[in-house]
Amino acid sequence: MSTTVAGSHAHDEAHGAHAHGSFLSTYVFSLDHKVIGIQFLFSTMLWLFVGGLLALGIRWQLAWPWTEMPVIGKILFAKEGGQISPEFYTMLVTMHASVMIFFVIIPILAGAFGNYLIPLMVGADDMAFPTLNMLSYWFMWPAFALMICSFFVEGGASAAGWTSYPTLSAIPQAAPGSHTGQTLWLWGLIFVGISSMMGSVNYMTTIIQMRAPGLTMFRLPMTIWGMFITAVLQAFALPVLTAALFMQVLDRMVGTGFFIPEGLIVNGQSAGPGGGQPLLWQHLFWFYSHPAVYIMILPAMGMVSDILTTFARKPLFGYKPMVYSISGIAGLGFIVWGHHMFMSGMNPALGTTFMVSTMMIALPSAVKTFNWLGTIWGGKIEFTTPMLFALSFVCMFIIGGLSGIFMAATPVDIFIHDTYFIVAHFHYVLFAGTAMGVFGGIYFWFPKMFGRMMNEPVGKLHFFLTFIFLNGTFYPMHILGAGGFPRRLADPYHYETFKHLLAMNQFMTICAICMGFSQFLLVGNMAYSLFFGPKAGRNPWKANSLEWMAPSPPGHGNFDFQPVAYRGPYEYNFPGHDTDYYPQIEPPRPGEKQPEHH
């Protein structure tokens, strides 16, 4: 243990600033990756409820159009007479998507779980750049403030859609009353992008340079592979979006013409110098925002892989194919952005190229799906709360992925592009999929984060209610979309064609309200367990990866010994071993044959 003590002292000297500092330096402006991860977790969960309230405003309008909302909704959303106006409905749609994508899904996966788990799972004492890590969290706060303020400026928040297409978004006078809100939205996303870029540099450096002795790249858990590939995606895609956001800010504030076409007249006056291309924004935006789809799900895929193996008590089926497939998904994700633009008048030959490359993503996705099924096949499955959420993730991802193949076909997409079939697809991938992975991750790593176990019966009730009401909310959207029900419209029932779909929308809204209230079970479970949950040992799930070898919760410097990895993280029921798990740090016995695939 002498080397352990020496290493601990060296860490204290190098990072002593956040070992025993003031309250502010220890818990607020902390340099400790674990505190920063928990800050991201609680911040994003608060925004999850904000985004959920905005969604309920949308659902109320579609179920009971032009009627007064209940008391809480009236306070939050109501205009004159307690009704949602068409303009306000567009704002709800824009801000719901923006909050959920940029303030919830991306930062809870990369920010919360990435920050907390990466050093622990690679056997490091902290991130490579602790100060940069702290700044990555605090750069989110200007974005938080700008988004909150946008709700209260004259004209309200952005109402140009979360995709912010020009010319509506780039010309202030094109959308009267939303001048300031749209500009605040753009600046908010710029700060989110800077935060994400800081995180991605840190994650890549930590994973490449700070792994424990013996922990080769092909001995990393899938969670780390998911975070690593996500960081690569962020590093290559974010600069393009950030440049586009600055261009649109300049169009709005300075009068440049990056996205404003020649001779455009709005409300009787010239829109600007012109010479720009509205479609340029779409190319730049989707070059980031399609990889962002994988930024929002690859970490969850990794987390689910680790949960499935732990509770199936089996090695991960096809470890290297899983790594290659997650890399293939990321690589293909960079060359398919044009499938969001099939309706833009694209050259058919180019459209066919995007269509075929999009369909190709189904191949590595199928590899992952069948490997998950191979992992649980014949396993001694323990139906814990994390396992239920992980199994649900696989089911929901299959549904969302299959509908994505429909949309990849240009002729099909032309008919369903602006219908609720699209809404069903991305909610199954990003909410029914990613959110299930996130919930499973919270239940799985909560004992490590806080040193206490969560309540299993309450957790299972949370799962079943969420699963039932989630499918009740989102599955009928496929039926609506197949019937041509349009998205983004405040009152589709104005058209005789859609009046018979009102009852289905009312059913979906009731399910959405119940799903929202079900999340208070998670909040209550977390709050109670923080103080009164049974204390967890170092390794309550009897898992193999390095984070479970540290104390629960880990102290400053993470490990009280120097971890050394002797094998991969998935050696469950190893032949000849006396327990059904074989931790990475346990040295091999004399003459014992080690697993070949690592």
Image (spheres, helix red, strand yellow):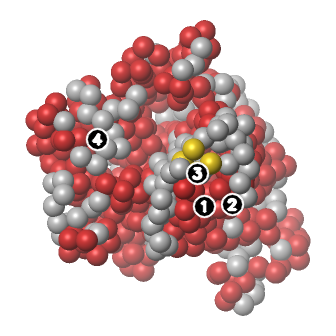
Q: Residue at x 33, y 32 (%)?
A: 419
Sequence order check, earlier mark of 1 and 4: 1
| Disc ID at residue 269 | 3
Residue 290 screen position, x and y as percent: 58, 35
Q: Nearer the viewer, mark 3 or mark 4?
A: 3
Give the spatial CA distance, label 3 vs label 1: 21 Å
Coordinates of residue 68 in the picture (x, y in percent) = 17, 66
The residues tagged by marks 3 and 4 sit, at their Cα atoms, a distance apart of 43 Å
Cα distance between the residues tagged 2 and 1: 8 Å
Query: Which element is circle 1 on?
Result: helix
In the picture of the structure, the residue carrying the numbered disc 4 is 474
**How many angstroms separate mark 3 from mark 2 (CA)?**
17 Å
Q: Earlier in the sequence, mark 2 or mark 4?
A: 2
Q: Residue at x 79, y 65 (%)?
A: 132
Q: Quadrant of the N terminus?
A: bottom right
What amino acid is labelled 1 in the image?
Answer: Thr
Three-letter code, disc 3: Gln
